[in-house]
Image (cartoon, coloured by chain):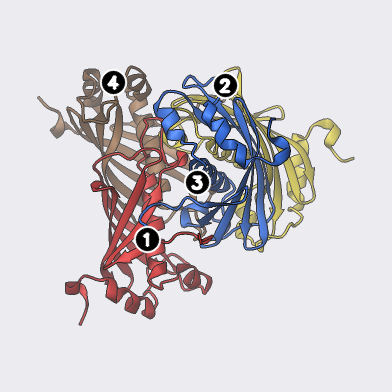
Chain colours: A red, B yellow, C blue, D brown
Amino acid sequence: MTSSLPYSGHFVGREHRFAVRVYFEDTDFSGVVYHASYLRFMERARSDMLSVAGIIQSDAFAAGDGVYAVAELNIKYLRPAHFDDALLIVSTVEQVRAASCLIHQRVMLGDERLTEATVLAAFLSPEGRPRRQPKDWIQKFTPLLPEQNIAS
Amino acid sequence: MTSSLPYSGHFVGREHRFAVRVYFEDTDFSGVVYHASYLRFMERARSDMLSVAGIIQSDAFAAGDGVYAVAELNIKYLRPAHFDDALLIVSTVEQVRAASCLIHQRVMLGDERLTEATVLAAFLSPEGRPRRQPKDWIQKFTPLLPEQNIAS
Amino acid sequence: MTSSLPYSGHFVGREHRFAVRVYFEDTDFSGVVYHASYLRFMERARSDMLSVAGIIQSDAFAAGDGVYAVAELNIKYLRPAHFDDALLIVSTVEQVRAASCLIHQRVMLGDERLTEATVLAAFLSPEGRPRRQPKDWIQKFTPLLPEQNIAS
Amino acid sequence: MTSSLPYSGHFVGREHRFAVRVYFEDTDFSGVVYHASYLRFMERARSDMLSVAGIIQSDAFAAGDGVYAVAELNIKYLRPAHFDDALLIVSTVEQVRAASCLIHQRVMLGDERLTEATVLAAFLSPEGRPRRQPKDWIQKFTPLLPEQNIAS
């Protein structure tokens, strides 16, 4: 049976893999995917990675705790993607601190690396100030971290 | 001196005229402006039309009164626009009711009509329910209406 | 095994069903999904519906035949969607002509109808003129049509 | 008389200044401007900066010469922007090479710096390969460069 629920990607070890089809909306007249569209793809992958790991952003927001916001982003565009391409967004959590997490993401087309980015996401209070993220989130992040970055 | 404030268009009689440059973000790989981009252009024009007429949506939202939302939209795409085109969005208020307003908009490239739409905007409470719009908004709309639609 | 290929929805009878998660990018500050985002959801569903039915737009574009463009769109916004909602886009082909097709689409949240639209898509030559769509597309559309609209 | 042509910003010395109003489309449900929207603002500013300097991207594209694409982007989000804010995008060309240019951009709200980025734009052939940009572009860039970066 085919699901009527949205696809959320899945983990293979520490890597969250999230497939994305390129639609009209993602391209520009130069014939390739518009550079800012990758940021949208990567945020979908991050949101779903967190979700699959049990970190529910919408609950924290509804409870008035706060929300993640991108604080810093570094991205390299190596090769272009095109309409109808089936991309794979591969995301790993590299570091977690009290009020932020650092995520590495790459966009793959088959074996080719198209785009590569690191994203620092900061947890913000509803007023927009940096705030400690919920404690159980830290726990849920732990199995996703590289061994050397797990605080003892 | 050249202004460092954003451009908000201007009225010529009942018509609000708002110029828009087509950028990379607005186009798709087929070489023309993406169909949903016109909705973004038209909302910018509506927001600025209201603003120029003294109807400040951000104040109503901040005060907890409510906000406009599109309730219905009918649009015809007659001819395409391209990267770097200088478009003109021409908007007129056609009707104002207690909790909504009806706006006609066309997108022009020189003398050519590219796109034509009617948009019904409903005023909604913060909970998303239809609500009477602020009384002074109705007054501010009055000079923008066609003569036959002004309630006596 | 979980797929690493993008999700493309599936047919249940004549209905193509396509699930969409609401992400940050789809919402606006008023707290709900931005009205133009539904047009993006609906185009993803249309592209995948055609694809599942064997109509490959990227092949026709690459071959220099042409591409579909939205010619007319009528949409009603009945209820809002919110961040993290799991929406279902239900699409049916209502009519096919030599150079166009008419598609009905509704956006569902569980049993609730949020948005409803009809979209007329016209097949255009690379120069942007209306053109007959590929003959085998007409054939592929036939099983998707309501009985009374199949030309004898 | 008020212009019906789109606003393109202006130079103050080496700085190109480009005002942007924040609309519904630019924000997300968390109440602030969506992080990818700044990339759209910054590309509008870059396109218009080049245009004002006499570098017409649409001509190079139409002539089959090529087009700029973002090759690398580093951005810091310091403070959020909100609906209806009047932002100023300040752009400077920092370096020009045969096939690329490096641009610094900051997004200001009054005296506050909200966002800061460096963008490496590469000139690409229609097939997507790095290519020398048109010679007269290099000349047109020269007066925009910091003194130490002008090749003697």
Which circle marks residue C130 in the picture?
2
Q: Which residue is mark 3?
A: D22
Q: Which residue is mark 4?
A: D65
Is there any visible trace of residue D52 in the rendered image?
no
Give how far across and how far down residue C88 sits, in percent: 57, 56
Residue C15 higher or lower than D4, as above or below: below
Residue D61 higher or lower than A147, as above or below: above
Instruction: Place residue C114 in its image quadrant.
Output: bottom right
**Residue A100 as seen in the image, left or right of residue C38:** left
Q: The C terminus of chain B lies in which quarter of the figure? A: top right
**Residue D97 as seen in the image, left or right of residue D91:** left
The Cα–Cα distance between marks 1 and 2, rounded to whole angstroms, is: 41 Å
Numbered disc 1: secondary structure: helix
Give how far across and how far down residue C19 sits, in percent: 53, 56
Are dots 1 and 3 on a single chain?
A: no
**Residue B124 as seen in the image, left or right of residue D147:** right
The label nearer to you, 4 versus 3, is 4
Who is closer to the viewer here, D47 or D70? D70
The label nearer to you, 1 versus 2, is 2
The label nearer to you, 1 versus 3, is 1
Give how far across and how far down residue D86 sits, in percent: 48, 45
Are dots 1 and 4 on a single chain?
A: no
Q: Residue at x 80, y 50 (%)?
A: B98
